[in-house]
Image (cartoon, rainbow, N blue to C red):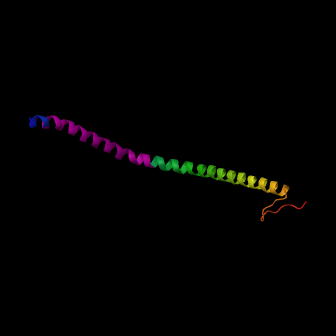
Amino acid sequence: MRLILIALLVPSLSACVVGTVARTAVDVVTLPVKVVGAGIDAVTTSQSEADEKRGRDIRREEERLGRERRLLEKRCAKQRPLPGDLCPAG
């Protein structure tokens, strides 16, 4: 009985091992191609992505400064400036 079970399990185990070895061989062969491709993508897109990020940062800063300027103008118009506000004389 044990001999029959062993005889049935050996082919299924060997198929798993062969499949794993084949998959590993494919991964080893394709790895350099994936690494080079990723390096090329990083070089070609990094500058444009950096430019886009810088543009977004500048736009956010300009929006923040605009909000602060409008609040300052409202405080000055109501004659209730904060200690650091420089309201125009008028």
| Quadrant of the drawing holding the C terminus | bottom right
Residue at image coords 39%, 47%: 31
* Residue farthest toward the right in the current orientation of the protein: 90
Residue 7: x and y in percent read: 13, 35
Residue nearest the observer in this picture, 76 or 22: 76
When the figure is inspected, residue 46 is found, relative to residue 11, above or below; the finding is below
Determine whether, in the image, residue 10 is placed left or right of residue 29.
left
Residue 18: x and y in percent read: 25, 40
Q: What secondary structure predominates along the stretch shown in magenta? A: helix
Residue at image coords 83%, 58%: 76
Residue nearest the observer in this picture, 20 or 1: 1
Determine whether, in the image, residue 47 is placed left or right of residue 88.
left
- Could you tell me how many numbered marks the image carries? 0
Residue at image coords 75%, 55%: 68
Determine whether, in the image, residue 61 is placed left or right of residue 44.
right
Residue nearest the observer in this picture, 32 or 57: 57
Residue nearest the observer in this picture, 72 or 38: 72
Residue 3: x and y in percent read: 9, 37
Determine whether, in the image, residue 44 is placed left or right of residue 75.
left
The answer to if 29 sits in the magenta stretch is yes
* Residue farthest toward the bottom in the current orientation of the protein: 83
Q: Quadrant of residue 23?
A: top left
The answer to if 46 sits in the magenta stretch is no
Residue at image coords 60%, 52%: 50
Q: Quadrant of residue 71?
A: bottom right
| Quadrant of the drawing holding the N terminus | top left
The span shown in magenta is 6-35
Residue 15: x and y in percent read: 23, 37
